[in-house]
Amino acid sequence: MTKSSRRWRLPSLGIGAQLIALVLVLGLVSAMAIQPTRQLLAQQHRIKATAQELHNTERANHRLGEQIARLRNPDFIEEQARSQIGLVRPGETAYLVMPKPHQHHNHHKHAHSARRRARDSAPSEEGGIRGFLNFLGL
């Protein structure tokens, strides 16, 4: 025997054994791919959720920025102070418009309760300042 004729030969497997080996190898490769695929899908889901949260936060920031600009506007502050706490500048005269009574016989009763509401809602020195400071958030 010559050296070239001394080759090692693997025993020949039948077709059935080869198919079983192929299916086992494909199953092993598939099983190894399942976990990374799950992780990829979970990451994609987290990315979408985070992007939506970012979008919502940006919209909220935009609205808050507009509100800050409005609250820094002296005209808006004056308007709110006049409507909420009855701000009257020196030299101005404040008028309280009374609603018309619904029926004539209740006129006295409505006028009395309207006067009481006007008296109770008229800003006092302390209440006006406190209301204004509350409005400013201080």
Image (spheres, rainbow, N blue to C red):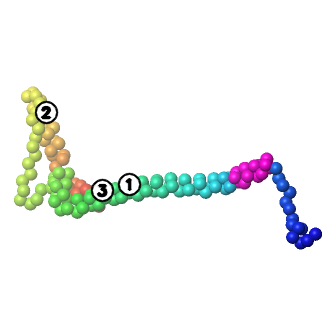
**Tag 2: amino acid:** Lys
| Relative side of 121 to 66, left or right | left
- What residue is at 51 percent from the left and 55 percent from the top? 44
Q: Which residue is mark 2?
A: 109
| Sequence-wise first label, 2 or 1 | 1
Q: Position of residue 58 (x, y in %)?
A: 36, 58
Residue 124 showing in the rendered view: no
Query: Which of these two is toward me, 66 or 2?
Result: 2
CA separation, marks 3 and 2?
Answer: 46 Å
Indicate whether 75 appears above or below 115: below
Q: Which residue is mark 1?
A: 56
Q: Give the number of the mark in front: 1 or 3.
A: 1
Which numbered dot is residue 63?
Answer: 3
| Sequence-wise first label, 3 or 2 | 3
Query: In the image, is residue 16 part of the stretch drawn in magenta?
Result: yes
Label 2: which secondary element: helix
Magenta range is 15-28
Query: Which of these two is toward me, 119 or 93?
Result: 93
- What residue is at 63 percent from the left and 53 percent from the top? 34
- What residue is at 30 percent from the left and 56 percent from the top? 63
CA separation, marks 2 and 1?
Answer: 52 Å
Neighbour tally class for label 1: few under 14, some 14-19, many 20 plus, Cα within 10 Å: few
Q: Position of residue 81 (x, y in %)?
A: 18, 55
**Tag 3: amino acid:** Arg
SS majority, magenta: helix
Neighbour tally class for label 2: few under 14, some 14-19, many 20 plus, Cα within 10 Å: few
Q: Residue furthest bottom?
A: 3
Q: Position of residue 38 (x, y in %)?
A: 59, 53
Figure quadrant of the C terminus: bottom left
Label 1: which secondary element: helix
